[in-house]
Amino acid sequence: MGRFFFRQTSSLWFIVLLINISIQFVGCGTPEAVRPALIPMPQEISWSEGIFRMSGNEHKVVKRMVDSLPGVAIHADEAYSLMVSPDSVVLQAMTPTGLFRGEQTLRQLTYLHKGREVVACCTITDFPAFRIRGFMQDVGRNYMSLPLLKEQIDVLAAYKFNVFHFHVTDNPGWRLESKLYPELKDPASMSRWPGKYYSQDEFKELVDYCHERHIMLIPELDIPGHSAAFRKALGIETMSDPRVKDILVALIDELCSLAPPEKMPYIHLGTDEVWHDFERPAPDLLSALAETVRANKRELIVWRPGQYIENDSTSIKQLWSSNGHPKPGHRYLDSRLNYLNHLDPFAGIGQLWFERINGAAMGDSLRMGGILCCWNDNNVNDERDILIQNPVYPGILTYSETSWKGQPVDFGEEYLAKMPSTGDPLYDEFAEFEERLVRHRDLYFRGMPFPYVKQSGISWKIIGPFDHQGDPGRVFPVEEAFLDSYVVDGKEYSWSGPYYGGTVHIRHFFGYPSWFEERQGTVYAAARIWSPRAQTIDFWIGFHDWSRSAGRRGGPFPQQGEWHHTRPVAWVNQSVVEPPVWNNPGIEANSEEFPFTDENYFFREPAKIELRKGWNQVLLKVPALRNSWKWMFTFVPVRMENGNVREVEGLVFEAGYK
C-alpha cells in the first residue's frame, strides 16, 4: 500500500522508493536539465549543472558527522549540508538525525534516467524553522491498525516530521493495554470498535518504529474530559472520585515504564473540553498527575484552552481553537488552524500553506512549532476511510513545507480563507508550491488517497449577495441573462473578481477574512472553460464541505434532488448539473455515529459533464441562510486514473461570462 520503506545501512536509516519511476519532464531533453521537486524546500539551495550518476559510483557517496555546520541558524541537531557534483555526493551533519533528514532530500533529488539512478547537482544548507513538527491521529475515537499507522509514520519520516502525536484514549475507547487495570480493554467499555486496543508490546513496537525514523511518539491520555470509556471500565461515576488519582498516577507510571525518556520524552494529558460536572477533577488531581510526569523525567503537554493546573510553571501548552492563546512564560505548540477534519482539500491546502505557525517565521525558546491534527470525530465504516475522507497526505506535505522552512511573510489571517490574486508574489509562490505538491502526488502516492489537483488557474467572477429575504430558492435575473449589472429591490449589483481557487469561501465558517461580510443571501459565480474538443469530463462539485466531526454539522443533509438544503444550482451551457443520488438523504445534523459514505465531492463519484469544443459557460447559484454554517462552493475538473486523481490537460478557465 505505502510507497516508502526503510532499510538499514551503516546504522543510518533512509527511505527508498519502492516503485521504478522514470520521471518525465516536458521540454527536458537531457537529465542535466532536471530539477526535482523538493518538499520541504531547503533553507538554502543553489542548483548547478550536471548530474551525479549513482550506478557504479556508490563509493563516491560520502556521509559523515562533523562538529559544526556553517550557515545553520537554529536547531543544528537536525541540520545538514549536502553537496552534489558530477563526481561525488557529500552529506554532512552534526547528528545521526541530521544525516537522516539529509537522506530524505537526497532521495528526492534522485531519479531514473534511462533506467539508471542519477542525482541532480546542487549545494544545500538546511535546518528546520521549528523544533517540533508533528502530526496527530485520534485512535481513541476510531481505532487504526499498526500497518496503517506505520504507513503514515513512513510518510512523516519522508517529509522531515519529528513527532507523531498518538491520541490513544477518548470517550469511545481507552485503547492502551494496562496490566494494572486490564478492565480498560474490556469491549463493553468501548462505544466504538469494541475490543480494539494496542497491547503494550504493540505500543513499544510503535515507539521503536518511530524512533528508528527519528520521530518521537507523544502518547496522549486525554483526561479528565473525554473519559467515558475510562469511567465505564472502572465503574467510576465522576472524575472527582477519590480513587481516580491513584489509578491515573499508576497508569502514568506504567506508561512511562514502556519506553525510556530518551525515546519518549513527552507525555500529553489532554485537560481540554471538560463540559460536564461528572468530568470535573478533584482539586489536587491534575497537579498530582503533572508531578508524576515530572517524576518520570518527562515533560508535560496539555491543551490550551484546558483545565487549570495548580503550581504549574513548566508545562507545554498545545494551542487549539480561536481561544487558544499562549500562556505567558510557557512554551507552546500551535494546532489552532490545522484540523484536517474541518479542511476542504482545496481551501484547506491554501490555509495550511498560508498559516504562519506560532505567528513567527521561525521558532524560539517559547515557540516550539506545531502539530497537524486529524480529529475524525465521526464514526467510520473502515479505518482507511479516515485517510480517504480527510486531506491527510496533501495536508502532511503542505505542513511539512511550512513547519520546516517557515513562512517569512507576516500577512496575518489575510489568506487563510482566500487566494491571492495574480500579480501578487504570494500567488506565484503558492502556484510554484502546488506544482511541487502534485509532482510528489504522482511520484510517491500512487494508490494512496491524495485528493488534490492544481487549482491556482481556476478563477471566477461573483455577483451578490442578493437579498433572498429568507427564501434561498428565490430566482434572480442572473439566471435569465448575463448583464454587467442588475437592479433588484432598488439596489444595484455588479460582478466583481476575479476570485481564485478550486474552492471559494464566500464567508468562512471560522470567521477568517473572506470575500464577503454578509451573513445571508444568494451569490452567483461565473466562469468559462475552454475545451480543445467535445468531451465528457469528471468534475468535483460541492456546496458544503461536511466536516468529519459533530455528525453533519450545518445540516440536515440534503434530500434527494438537492446539492444542499439551501438549494444551490450548477449550470453548464444552461443545462442543470444534477446532484448525486445520496446514500443517506435527509440525515439530521446530530449523526456522528452514522459513518460518511458520499457526503463530500472528493470521496464520491465525480459529476460527469459534457463540454463542447471551445468555450463553455458555467454558472453557480450559491445561497446561504443566516444560520448556515458554511457558505462556499467547489467546481473543479478532475481525471480519475486507476483510483488516482489527476489534472485534466488542455482546459482553460476564464473568470466571468460572454
Image (tube, rainbow, N blue to C red):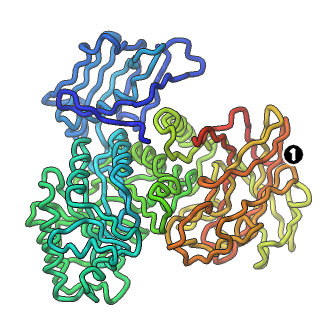
The image position of residue 394, as x and y in percent, is 49, 46
The image position of residue 145, as x and y in percent, is 36, 55
The answer to whether residue 429 of the structure is visible from this angle is no
Left or right: 530, with 293 as reference point: right
Left or right: 654, with 209 as reference point: right
Q: Residue 124, located in which quarter of the rendered image?
A: top left
**Of 249 and 554, which appears nearest the observer?**
249
Left or right: 601, with 31 as reference point: right
Q: Residue 259, located in which quarter of the rendered image?
A: bottom left
The image position of residue 42, as x and y in percent, is 36, 34
**Residue extending furthest toward the right:** 480
Instruction: Reply above or below: 203 against 445.
Output: below
Q: Residue at x 51, y 73 (%)?
A: 592
- Provide the residue designation for mark 1: 658
The answer to whether residue 281 of the structure is visible from this angle is yes
**Of 187 and 365, which appears nearest the observer?**
187
Q: Residue at x 16, y 30 (%)?
A: 68
In the structure shown, which secondary structural element does the residue marked by tag 1 occupy? loop
Left or right: 582, with 86 as reference point: right
On-image quarter of the C terminus: top right
**Residue extending furthest toward the left:** 295
Type of amino acid under label 1: Lys
Q: Residue at x 33, y 18 (%)?
A: 84
Instruction: Reply above or below: 386 against 36.
Output: below
- Give the class, few, some or many, for how many residues have Cα within 10 Å of label 1's Cα (few <14, many ≥20): few
Q: Residue at x 44, y 58 (%)?
A: 383
**Of 80 and 462, which appears nearest the observer?**
80
